[in-house]
Image (cartoon, helix red, strand yellow):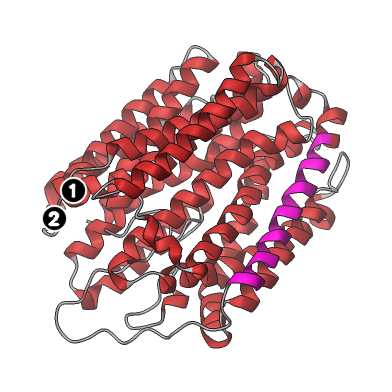
Amino acid sequence: MLLATILGSAVAMIDGTVVNVALPTIGRDFGVGVAALQWTVTAYTLTLAAFILVGGALGDHYGRRRIFVIGVIWFATASLLSGIAPNAVALILARALQGVGGALLTPGSLAIIQATFRPEDRAPAIGLWSGLSGVAVAIGPFIGGYLIEAASWRWIFLINLPVAAAVVIVAQRHVPESRDPTATGRIDLVGALLVALGLGAVVFGLIEGPGLGWTSPAVLASLIGGAAVLVAFVVVERRREHPMLPLGIFRSRQFSGANAVTFLVYGALGGSLFLIPLQLQQVLGYSPIQAGISLLPVTIVMLVFSARAGRLSQRIGPRLPMTLGPIIAGLGLGLLSTIGAGDAYLTTFLPAILVFSSGLVLTVAPLTAAVLSAAPVAHAGIASAVNNSVARAAGLIAVAALPVAAGITGSTYLHPAALSAGYRSAMLMAAVLCAAGGALALATIPGSLPRMRRKPVGPAPEECYNCALDATPLVASAGEDAGEVAGDDARAA
């Protein structure tokens, strides 16, 4: 069971980040500009963000193993289409399909463990899932860089096929079926489609605006129409009996504030991780594998220190870590904005990425605790899933907007001097977003959170062990506090 869930979640996590390392190579192979590279990333994130809540609900209704396996097969099929894509348009469409598959399989990964293992065995099982998934995330950019150099960027997608086949075989033989007997009502597909259409239209306008012109009918219609569709989504969700997004949980100032901080911080994270590999390869002359290895400190710092940050926030409250963390991360992004041609890794990039990682690790676990403690226990799963979707949407919009705002359009990324100037501006904007997240946390997050009670003897309610970061989940031993628990994007059903 652990083998199936770990491998299944790993392929989705890796493909969410490893593509960034391949972007310059893809751009050269297809002869496309920045807009096509943005769509290569955002197509995946768009459908994943739009449908991940639906993926969790489908598992609750129709069986978590069934939806998990369907998601793995879907993801593998889309990976094959990505690997054989003859042009950029075909690749973008295949990536969008990949996101749908990821939305089906990621919620089921942790939900299967939570629904199947005994309460006393659940924390060790999730701990093992966390550690091995973290290893997969850590080595993903390295493997991706090696495949790009040794063979082709297409293999970062094709390598998913044998892994997916193994997951399906193991899951069918060893993973028992489970579902939520209390899940009732229809799946809110209308809400998911409205989110996808609204976000997609807004992203289209932001990405294509520089090329088509900001006053062109297509761009204006997409921006205005997308905003109108997102407003319609809110109206529809307010009126539905079983909404995809229960808007009532946003009545909590703490919950709304924590998600607003998530939007700012993860927007900065998504935008910067899109641009850093471009800068490393096109300006500093790094190979794909060197660019992938350069980003490993982020994952290593998260692996080593996130649990400690959770314990710290439990002792002193989440406000101070969530205030200082984004500010320190913003400082790191400011330092990263200065890297340019001829700079040495050890004296420039490494110190900056370590400062950024330190701020991030101070933020993530307290943020997760603040989100979960703000929602009723019955809504813990949906609260974490909402936070996950907010983080995905933030990255989606940032990847579309930051390069445009910094003047990185068309074939700019092929000209080192122009790319470096735009990169510097975009990273400074991301730094401001992070600092704004810290200021918002100071205004909206309480100084302390109520400690969770120990688990009672007997059947325990299902819990949420997830957060929005594309990094390793961190789960402490059974009975520890919510501030010590952080994990990957999944909906604890």
Residue 354 image offset from top left, x and y in percent: 71, 62
Badge 2 is on which residue? 178
Tell me if residue 61 comes above or below residue 226 in the rendering: below
Mark with earlier residue (1, 2): 1
Residue 168 image offset from top left, x and y in percent: 22, 40
- Front residue of 6/198: it is 198
Residue 395 image offset from top left, x and y in percent: 57, 44
Residue 135 image offset from top left, x and y in percent: 47, 56
Q: Secondary structure at mark 2?
A: loop
When asked about the image quadrant of residue 159, the answer is: top left
Which is the main secondary structure of the residues drawn in magenta? helix
Quadrant for the C terminus in the image: bottom left
333 with respect to 341 (left or right) = left
Residue at screen point 24% across, 64% down: 114
Tell me if residue 348 comes above or below residue 100 in the rendering: below
Residue at screen point 58% across, 82% down: 447
Q: Is residue 428 magenta?
A: yes
Q: Amino acid at mark 1?
A: Arg
Q: Is residue 66 visible in the rendered structure shown here?
A: yes
Q: Which residues are magenta?
A: 422-444
Q: Secondary structure at mark 1?
A: helix
Residue at screen point 35% across, 38% down: 192
- Front residue of 478/237: it is 237
Spatial CA span between label 1 and label 2: 7 Å
Q: Is residue 244 visible in the rendered structure shown here?
A: no
